[in-house]
Amino acid sequence: MNERILKLKNLYKDSSKHSTYQNIPSFVQEALGYQEHINEEWRGDTARYKFILGFLQELKVDSIVDIGANTGFFSHSLMKDLPNISVTAIEPNKNHAEFIREINEIFNLTNIKVIDKPLQIENFDTLQNEFDCALILNVLHHAGVDFDQDKVKEPYEVWDYMENYLNKFSKVSSLIILQLGYNWGGDKTKPIVPTSDCYQMFSNLYNSAQRSGWNIREVAYYFKREQEYKTMPQSILDTIDNDESKSRDLFNSWCLSMDISTSSEFYKRPLLILENSAN
């Protein structure tokens, strides 16, 4: 086996908590003949990436920060599909950060910066610039477990932490693509929201974003039958502020048509696109 591919494999499969988590970007697979199998029936990147790319292609985006970049699937894929952007990949796992750097070196990618430290609330200022868009995908439910251990002691405290995080994050980016898991630190015995109550997750995220100074531009859920994310009807968002009961009924009816209840916990996580309300 090519020594470089072997190095990538060892960095990718480092037996840490989030190893063997992301796909290998298609351009890497094609050029190196290197791929890793992810069972996308219960968790995956393909459908999310298609939705995120479609959204970003409609905007003028020059800079992206990928928080919790893992092995760089989103960072590298977006850099290839949006070739004029610059990307900052923040990944505290040293092996996974090195995996990203290795891909950068192999393909001579100079527009991706790698930071191998967690982006905690107190070090937002270290980024020193404002990004057009931030990816915060399935990161913040790990607060208190994998980072900022002194700030979250119980699962329910994740919500206050997230509001504080998002409020201060307005200095970093004017647009966020956000996703949150149902379980604190990924521990199924410590739910933040019961996996069976998709509306509670949606409404908690909506209200937290609003309180922290962000507007919800779009919400999307995975549609298993078509294996893609679909945007939630605007009518659900329009009613949540003044008639939560009606909003819940509309939400549940839509979820039933989307068959969301049969999805895995991962695919029950909504994708939210947030805009800074000051803009």
Image: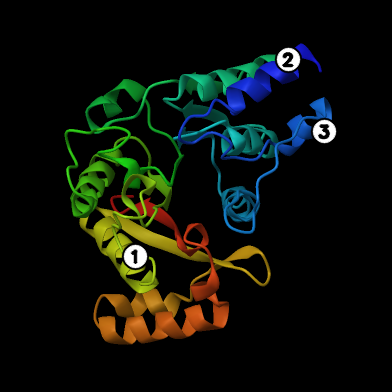
Q: Quadrant of residue 258?
A: bottom right
Which residue position holds label 1? 201
User: Crowding near pointer 3: few (<14 within 10 Å), some, many (20+)?
Assistant: few
User: Crowding near pointer 1: few (<14 within 10 Å), some, many (20+)?
Assistant: many
- 170 or 46: nearer the viewer: 46
Say which element carries label 3: helix
Q: Is 163 placed left or right of 112 in the picture?
A: left
User: Crowding near pointer 2: few (<14 within 10 Å), some, many (20+)?
Assistant: few
Say which element carries label 2: helix
Which residue position holds label 2? 4
Task: Look at label 2 and name its amino acid.
Answer: Arg
Which residue position holds label 3? 30
**Which of marks 2 and 3 precedes in the sequence?**
2
The image shows residue 146, relative to residue 39, as above or below, that is above
Task: Look at label 3 and name its amino acid.
Answer: Glu
Task: Look at label 1 and name its amino acid.
Answer: Met
Q: Is 257 placed left or right of 175 in the picture?
A: right
- Residue 259 horizontal/vertical position (percent): 55, 77
